[in-house]
Amino acid sequence: MSEAPVTAHTDPVYDGLSLIASRHCKRAFLDRPVPRDVLAEVLLAAGQAPSSRNIQPWRVTVVTGTTLDALTRTLREAFDRGESPRPDYANRPPTLDDTAAERARTALSGVLRAKGHAPDDTTAGRAHLRDNLRFYGAPAALVCHLPADAVPATFLETGLFLQNTMLGLVARGLGSCPQFSVAGYADALRRKLDIDADRIIVCTLAVGHPDETAPVNRFVPRRAGLEEYVRWS
Ligand SMILES: Cc1cc2nc3c(=O)[nH]c(=O)nc-3n(C[C@H](O)[C@H](O)[C@H](O)COP(=O)(O)O)c2cc1C
């Protein structure tokens, strides 16, 4: 594994909006470690996220190396045993309206197609879920957790922090994928990573140098037009 320096975006034309618009999920990574100081730099900048009265509720456990290998093994064993995911909170309403349901279907089938599978191939669907549990082969995983008394605004603030983190990673030539699927194994994450039993596991982030030759890393689900979510009054 090489330790080549990470690339930073230094082009002044690469402005903030371009950075925001260029962030998309990466689900295939190079076998190249992410330097700890780069992660620290990004997480420090991400911590500038706003929060109600500056509470800064987010906590992150950074997992790499043999700890990541052991965690991945544990998660996949749980999956292979047929253990049902038991996340600490719901990530979407019990029923989706037609538009939301269509977007969710298209996003998943796009990823499966980009991985060379038919969207209705249930074996491939399961393999994709299992791939989540190895963090898509990323050399680093971030596990984001919150106190047990977290309220909706706590999650809102944590989302701001996570988006900052993902954008910061892009700015340093890295890619990421947020993962709720892994949070389905919250008990295993807490146990393996010495996270207190009452902490809420929000999600994980797979982090690494994206393999830009992988078709899955070029799939970008279509976004709604402005008129679909903005009203000027
Ligand atoms: C909270 C959250 C959880 C997510 N969980 C997963 C996941 O478990 N696995 C995965 O591959 N993608 C996951 N995603 C990524 C979304 O599918 C993705 O952001 C969406 O389809 C838009 O694609 P883009 O981020 O590439 O633009 C998650 C995103 C968010 C914000």
Image: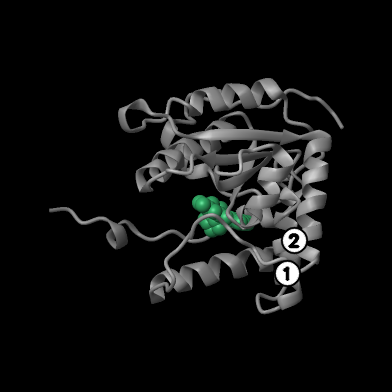
Residue ranking furthest to the right: 1
Location of residue 2 by image quarter: top right
Q: Are there few (<14), some (14-19), or many (20+) residues within 10 Å of tag 2?
A: many
Disc 1 to disc 2: CB gap under 8 Å: yes
Q: In which quarter of the image is residue 223?
A: bottom left
| Residue 10 spot, x, y in % from top left | 56, 23
User: Identity of the amino acid at label 2?
Assistant: Arg
- Left or right of 84? Residue 96 is left
Q: Where is residue 123 in the image (x, y as percent from the top left)?
A: 76, 75
Question: Is disc 1 placed on a helix, strand or loop?
Answer: helix
Q: In this view, does 171 lie to the left or right of 28?
A: left
Q: What residue sits right under mark 2 in the picture?
A: 130
- Going 75% across and 63% down the picture, which residue do you hit? 79
The answer for how far apart the CA atoms under marks 1 and 2 are is 6 Å
- Residue at image position (35%, 43%) is 153
Q: Which percent across, then down, holds residue 168? A: 54, 31
Q: Is residue 187 above or below residue 161?
A: below
- Amino acid type of the residue that numbered disc 1 sits on in the rendered structure: Arg
Ligand 1 image position (quadrant): bottom right
Q: What x and y, as percent, mark residue 29?
A: 74, 44
Q: Is mark 2 on a helix, strand or loop?
A: helix
Q: Is residue 220 visible?
A: no
Between 185 and 5, the one lying in front of the other is: 185
Residue with the mark numbered 1: 126
Q: Does the residue labelled 1 lie within 8 Å of ligand 1?
A: no
